[in-house]
Amino acid sequence: MTESTKSEADVAANAALARIRKALPDADPQKHLPDVSPERIPRHIAVIMDGNGRWAVKQGKPRQFGHQHGAETVRRVVAEAGRLGIEYVTLYSFSTENWKRPEDEIRDLMALCELYCKSQLEELVENSIRVRVIGRREGLPETVLAALDNLVEVTHAKSPTGPTLCLAINYGSREEILDATKSIAKKAAAGELTPDEITSDVMGEHLYTAGMPDPDLLIRTAGEMRLSNYLLWQISYAEIYVTETLWPDFYEQDLHNAVRAYAKRDRRFGGLSKGS
């Protein structure tokens, strides 16, 4: 590396570190991941948390046991993400397709969601973590909606800065795109938009994730090699990291490994590599 190139890298790293610390005052990526430049820390990671049921079955336990331990993994990963300087973590918590699961498992998942909202509220506030929820409200139990709404309201009120935990609940990307399209169509029909004014930015403003940056990194656990109707618009240029590790066994070091793998990628966004 030439002195000029090194200088440019230092400037980029310092700028990234300043951005991270402005958004996350308590973050210290250089301490927790010293081998990765701050400019290579993803701003937003999305996670498909797969393997809870398989983890439980391997231990001769009911699937609910795996979901409970998966909730503990959420706590670990979100806290570590904040320390690394990752501003947004979006978790695929319950998909629109998950309604096809057995009724008792769905009931347990809804109860676990409500319990998580209540039991983790204090810790989320202590760690200045703000919660956001994306997905359709229709179909979710009223008690779950109330718990989610309270979690969002309290964490936003008490955490003006800090990482954002985005929970995708009753979420499906095709449904999200349909909802956004319908909303735009209504505005066009009312004369608020012309067809030529409908751009990618306008579409983004009508998605559930409006106001959030697109994910830089998509992590999928348990070795599955599919996107499962998750953030299809938003992950158009995300780097994908798949690990065989089941979600309840996903620890801070596993997150570090995913970020390290991401940091080595050459993100071209359809262009050419540097030097090509």
Image (cartoon, rainbow, N blue to C red):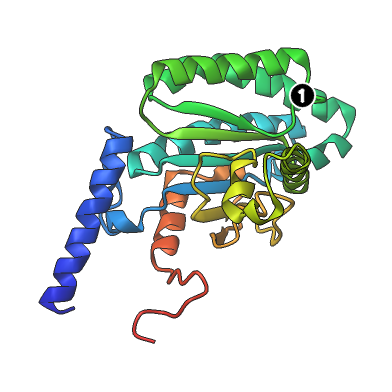
Whether residue 31 can be seen here: no
In x, y percent, where is residue 235? 59, 56
Whether residue 93 can be seen here: yes
Q: Secondary structure at mark 1?
A: helix
Q: Quadrant of the N terminus?
A: bottom left
Q: Nearer the viewer, residue 25 or 233?
A: 233
Residue 4 sits in which quadrant?
A: bottom left
Q: Nearer the viewer, residue 215 or 66?
A: 215
Q: Is residue 6 above or below residue 41?
A: below
In x, y percent, where is residue 114? 66, 18
Q: How many marks?
A: 1
Q: Quadrant of the C terminus?
A: bottom left
Q: Is residue 105 above or below residue 32?
A: above
Q: Residues within 10 Å of mark 1 (few under 14, many from 20)?
A: some
In x, y percent, where is residue 36? 30, 58
Horizontal placement of 145 versus 154: left or right? right
Q: Residue at x 78, y 45 (%)?
A: 178
Q: Residue at x 82, y 25 (%)?
A: 139
Residue 263 sits in which quadrant?
A: bottom left
Q: Which residue is mark 1?
A: 108
Q: Residue at x 61, y 17 (%)?
A: 149
Amino acid at circle 1: Asp
Give the residue furthest to the bottom.
Answer: 276
